[in-house]
Structures are given as C-alpha cells and as structure tokens.
Image: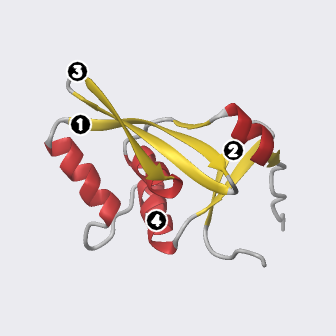
Amino acid sequence: MLEQGPVVLLIVGDRFVPIHVDPTVAVSIVHALSGGASPRPLSHDLMRLMLLEMGAKVTRAVITLKDKTYYADLTISLGNRTLVFDSRSSDAIALAVLFKAPIVVVKPTWESAGQPWTEPKRETS
C-alpha cells in the first residue's frame, strides 16, 4: 500500500531521505522554513517558546531508521547540560528547523534509505 501525505525530503548532494510526516507537523515545518506564522501557536511553536523561556535550545536532531520506522534523538542544551530525548523524527525535524539546528541522518540510515536526487525540471515558457 502506498503511503500518502506530506513528505520531508532531507537532501544532501545528489541523495535524499524521504520522511513522511502528519499534516500538522508539515504545517509547522513549512511555517518555520518560510518565516510564516499560524494564527495560534502550534505544538512545536509552544515547545520552542517554552524551551527559550527556560534558557534551553535545540542543538541537533539525529535521524535513524529501525525496522522501517524513523526515530530521532533530539539534543537540547540547557546551561552547561546537554539532554538527549527520544523523539518522533517528524517532531525532531520541526523543532530543529525552528531552532535552525542541524538535522543529521546517521550513515547506516543514509546508506539504506537514501535515494538518488535529481533537481526537478522547471517549465519554461
């Protein structure tokens, strides 16, 4: 069965890893990338505000693939402490984008799930 819905493409060079996300997470990522905002804070916006208020920030998201499911470790720095939380990959990506933090795909996942990327052709008139 073909999965449908929003997909995040993590692209490096000529390869990409596709990660399906739910529509709410997709909206959050699009707003973070475009600088837009929703009329009310979405969950990831709220999490960002809470972390900033506590003096914390997301420093990276590390994506892994286990048994056909993507997982993430979300790293947060709080003062001199570094905390790592198990996370859905989509939530980690959304928060990393909001904090402009790197998103890392571990090498074994990149090698097993990476696909060739070619730039989409643009129509000319």
Using the numbered discs, state the Cα–Cα distance from disc 4 to disc 1 in whole angstroms.
Answer: 21 Å
Sequence order check, earlier mark of 1 and 3: 1
Q: Considering the image in quadrants, where does the N terminus appear?
A: bottom right
The percent position of residue 47, horizontal first and vertical second, equals 27, 54
Reading the image, the residue beneath label 2 is 11
Q: Tell me which amino acid carries mark 2.
A: Ile
Reading the image, the residue beneath label 3 is 80
The percent position of residue 65, horizontal first and vertical second, equals 65, 48
Sequence order check, earlier mark of 4 and 1: 4
Q: Residues within 10 Å of mark 2 (few under 14, many from 20)?
A: some
Q: Do the residues bearing badges 4 and 3 touch, measured as CB atoms within 8 Å? A: no
Sequence order check, earlier mark of 3 and 2: 2
The percent position of residue 78, horizontal first and vertical second, equals 23, 31
- Residue drawn at x 68%, y 54% as measured from the top left: 67
Disc number lying in front (4 or 2): 4
Sequence order check, earlier mark of 4 and 3: 4
Sequence order check, earlier mark of 4 and 2: 2
**89 is higher (above) or lower (below) than 81:** below
Q: Do the residues bearing badges 3 and 2 touch, measured as CB atoms within 8 Å? A: no
Q: Tell me which amino acid carries mark 4.
A: Val
Disc number lying in front (3 or 2): 3
Q: Residues within 10 Å of mark 1 (few under 14, many from 20)?
A: some
